[in-house]
Image (cartoon, rainbow, N blue to C red):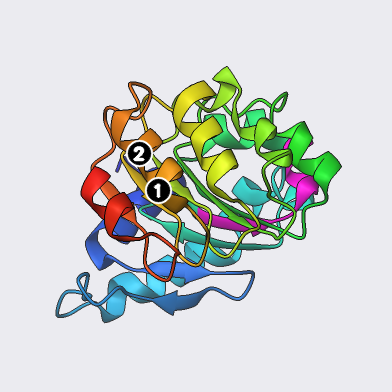
Amino acid sequence: SSAGDPRGEFIQIQCMLRRRLWGADGRSGAGKDDPSPPNAEQPRAREQELFKTPAKMWLASARPYIQIWCWRRGFLDIVETNAKFLPGAAQLLAEHPIHLNLSSLKPADLAGLATADLHDLRGLELITRSLNNTTVRGLLGKNLAGLQTLITMNTALRAEGVVALARDSHLTGLRSWSLEGGSIGAAGAAAIAASPVLRNLRVLSVRNTDIDATGVAAI
């Protein structure tokens, strides 16, 4: 980073330390595959200095729309929030490559996903029983074509909704989809396997679902 560029310095230090900073107090968390390097005391101290003031300013425009967040490699990485995120989606996604965790959504909120500016969103986790065969229409829009990771765990989505996502969505960039704890059925599995929309899908998690031997064979 160049002198006088705190954002560049923050990015550089976080890339070196290989850890996340969570929330307003900057709780640290390194992944098991990303241990911090040796002799990291001084960079950690400088990271905290940058986090206390400049990072708060970088976050200011996004703060009204998010509840829980972490920094990684100098950018917002994981954001957990609810439907209040949607009005600020375009600005936040233009600035940060986030994975978005949405919870406490009502059916009307899921419908709003179809018109929200989510073109730059790469990862989405929906934590809501409101996601079902009807509200899944909120995921069929072209605005989610850039999505690479989708997690719909323990929702009320059933085979009919899975078929709709496989057949009618625009998730052509999707590479990983977790349906754990849901209901797929043989029809849903067959639709996923035959879907031209999901041609780039590489990882499909169906643990604790009702998929049977016929569905497994289809996939």
Q: How packed is label 2: few (under 14 Cα within 10 Å), some, or many (20 or more)?
A: many
* Left or right: residue 199 compared with residue 11: left
Which residue is found at the position 37% from the left and 45% from the top? 189
Label 2 sits on residue: 190
- The quarter in which the N terminus is drawn is top left
Amino acid type at mark 2: Ala
Compared across the picture, whether 88 is left or right of 162 comes to right
Check disc 1 and report its element: helix, strand or loop: helix
Magenta part of the chain = 78-87
Position of residue 86 measured from the top left corner of the image (x, y, whole percent): 74, 38
Q: Nearer the viewer, residue 198 or 51?
A: 198
Give the residue displayed 28% in from the left and 27% down from the top: 199
Q: Answer above or below: position of 7 versus 166.
A: below
Q: What is the three-letter code of the residue carrying label 1?
A: Ala
State if disc 2 and disc 1 touch (CB < 8 Å). Answer: yes
Quarter of the rendering containing residue 107? top right
Q: Residue at x 77, y 34 (%)?
A: 111
Residue to which mark 1 is pinned: 186
Q: Position of residue 84 (x, y in %)?
A: 80, 47
Point out residue 91 in the picture as x, y percentages from the top left corner: 65, 30
Question: Magenta stretch containing residue 57, yes or no?
Answer: no
